[in-house]
Image: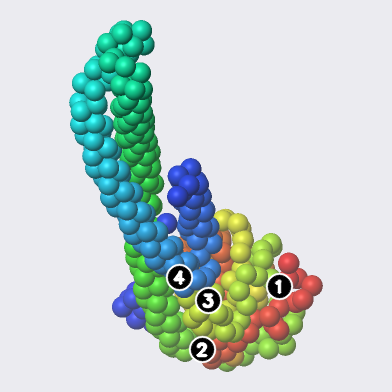
Amino acid sequence: MSPALLLALLLSGKEALEDERADVHDRLEQERQAYEALLADRKDVLGALDLVERFFRDGTAHAEGLARSVAQLEARADAQRSSQLLAAAEARRARLALGPKVVQLDRVLRRGALTRLVSAQGFAQLVKQERALGLVARADLAELEGLEAVEAFARLEAARAERLSESARALSGALAEAQALLAARRAAWQELLASVTAESRQASRVVAELEAEEKHLTSLMGELQSSDTSEFRQAKGHLPFPTPSGLIEAAFGKVVNPRFNTVTVQKGLDIRAALGTPVRSVAPGTVVYSSWLKGYGNVVIVDHGAGYHSLYAHLAHSLVEPGNQVEEEEEIAKVGDTGSLKGAYLYFEIRKKGEAVDPMPWLDPQGVP
């Protein structure tokens, strides 16, 4: 089967005003930090969404509470202004009524006691006049004291109204901050939701595509002809590691994706190695495939006889062609990131008659980095 035909098989896949302000700022900072933490660590996507949604609900309730407080303060300020205006009007009326009385009393008092004594028709009349004058003076004094009290009350009401207005203005500022915070939380929630939804869909699509490509690869491996005889079976447990250095990042078998709680079957080894690291054949054999496979990037497949093949994927480039004979530990390619979703690494498989087998029992334990 030609490389072109093999490739064709795989193409398809966040009433103390200062406290209130401080509380708003604290909430803002906490939620910013929480949101940044969610973006930095998204291992628990559902938990992240739940946290942002809870901030959204809390912010809505907080903004509604502030709006009610502002309305109450404004209503109280209006009531105080009305009371102050009534008190001021009463003070003006009382002052106008008391003015002539005070002027008349002042004139009488300025005449002096001797003048009043001379003008009186006897001692009894004098006593009566002085008594009446005292009553008038006390009454006027009482009215004057009452006027002063009314004026003081008016000043007090004016001061109260001003304080309430200041409180309303300050709380309105806090409300504006809370509303801005709410808008930011809504935007953050929507952004994160959209991101996670897109990422989830992408992950689901990638998994489906990779599963499809793996099936195609299995079919391809089954179609590749193998020589009838081989010493590959006797080499089990003694094969060299396919790279001179590297770290096994994912082993053979079921792998759980912690981000989406999905399970995929790993049919080979993910070996993290630097870009350009030499890739070596694990045993003698014949190169039967050296080309591109969708989902795997550049791939080299070596036939070791008796139905055994080794596969090397995500290569930067291949150093061999189909039909080439290769020896054990001969360099056949360089580590790359072609077709990779996680950077440069080598994907390595061993297959027996098209079926993937765990490579670890085949590799020499002393040769595994």
Q: CA distance from mark 1 to mark 2?
A: 22 Å
Q: Earlier in the sequence, mark 1 or mark 4?
A: 4
Q: Residue at x 42, y 57 (%)?
A: 14
Q: Position of residue 309 (x, y in %)?
A: 56, 82
- Position above or below: 225 against 119: below
Write the residue at 27% across / 42% down. 83
Give the residue at the far right of this rendering: 366
Q: Where is the C terminus found, in terms of image quarters? A: bottom right
Quarter of the rendering containing residue 158? top left
Mark 1 crowdedness (10 Å alpha carbons): few <14, some 14-19, many ≥20: many
What residue is shown at x 43% (from left), y 82% (from top)? 211
Q: Earlier in the sequence, mark 2 or mark 4?
A: 4
Residue bearing the label numbered 4: 50
Q: CA distance from mark 1 to mark 4?
A: 49 Å
Q: Which residue is mark 1?
A: 240
- Residues packed near mark 2 inside 10 Å, few (<14), some (14 to 19) or many (20 plus): some
- Mark 2–mark 4 Cα distance, whole angstroms, equals 45 Å
Which residue in the protein does label 3 denote? 257
